[in-house]
Image: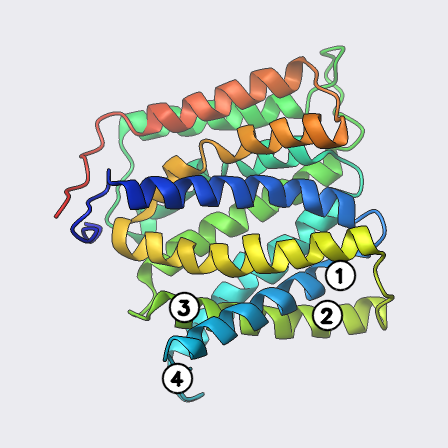
Amino acid sequence: MPPTLPHKGLHGLPLLGISLFLILVWGSAFTMVDVAVRTVSPDWLVAFRMTFGAAIVLAYALLIGHRLPPLRDKRWLWYITLGFTGASFPFVLLAMGMKTIDSGLTAIIVGVMPLITIVLAHFFTNEKLTPWKLVGFIMGFGGIVVLFLPKELSLALVKDWQAQVLILIAATSYAVTTVIASRAPDTPSPVAAAMMLFMGAAMSVGWALVNSGPPMMPNMTALLCLLALGLGSTGAATVVYLWVIDVAGLSVIARINYFVPVCSVILGVWLLKEPLDWRIYVSLFVIILGVVISKIGEPKSKSA
């Protein structure tokens, strides 16, 4: 049973504001990656993003009086794992996939993450699978299948199906991270985020050096996107994400994720002039409906 929020309660203004913040920074992240990956290799895009994010979160944690635990502390093993499954690994997959597919489509595929989380939570947490959750998962899976269909509705796959598979694997990695984070040892969210991003940054920089060689200086547009990604969707959002899991449980993160694909599609069409076709509309509707159905009959969280 997830712990209760402080005195404001789950439906208070603070959680609403935090939810809107996460929707915006996560939704806009796909748009910024789409822009940055045009001139920066996927490996170094992730390394820059992780390094900026880790630096700002570590500075914030130290500024407010926290200290990182000693290296012998068992929590480092948890956050090494979270740094890999929740940052460096899926970020590389997203950047690779977005070399050929749009930001809005990417966000829709990642939008199936709450449904994958529901299935994983059944086996690894106390949030068990119900008939409604199963129906929601099947619907969400159907929404993903729609994205792999060509416009002509033949049995062939879309030409960029390999990139979409990479994005789907990244979504699964995010779901694994959410479940692991819910079981991680109790740690203040700024410290947890600093440990997670520090380890993710170390792995990302090492991988980029081995796989892509020394980095080239990004152009100004890409550099601004990388800074925004590091400070916002990677740094600040990771602190908030871990805090929400700690005080509200997995279900609130799932509800926030309803709206991230919608935000990303709107930004992609508005800022990047990305095209829309029937598959986008159908898949977005079916996935969000599946997530909503999966919550039917779920007990309401209690407020303090």
Q: Are marks 2 and 1 in contact (CB under 8 Å)?
A: yes
Task: Report the residue marked by disc 2.
Answer: 207
Whichever of callouts 2 and 1 sits on the residue coming sooner in the sequence is 1
The residues bearing labels 4 and 1 have C-alpha atoms spaced at a distance of 29 Å
Residue type (three-letter) at the residue carrying disc 1: Asp
| Cβ atoms at labels 3 and 2 below 8 Å apart | no
Q: Whole-percent x and y of residue 180? A: 39, 59
Horizontal relation, residue 43 to residue 21: left or right: right
- How crowded pointer 1 is (Cα within 10 Å; few <14, some 14-19, many 20+) is rated as many
Circle 2 residues within 10 Å: few <14, some 14–19, many ≥20: some
Disc 4: which residue? 69
Q: Which of 30/144 is in front?
A: 30
Residue 190 badge:
3
Q: Which residue is mark 1?
A: 43
Quadrant location of residue 65? bottom left
Give the residue drawn at x 68%, y 31%. Answer: 268
Q: Is residue 126 above or below residue 165?
A: below
Residue 272 is situated, as x and y percent measured from the top left of the image, at 75, 32
Q: CA distance from mark 3 to mark 4?
A: 12 Å
Viewer-nearest of discs 3 and 2: 3
Task: Compare marks 1 and 3 and give the one earlier in the sequence.
Answer: 1
CB under 8 Å between callouts 4 and 2? no
Identity of the amino acid at label 4?
Pro
The image quarter in which residue 62 lies:
bottom left
Toward which corner of the image does residue 227 lie, by quadrant?
Answer: bottom right
Q: Is residue 121 left or right of residue 274?
A: left
Distance from disc 3 to disc 2, alpha carbons, whole Å, reads 25 Å
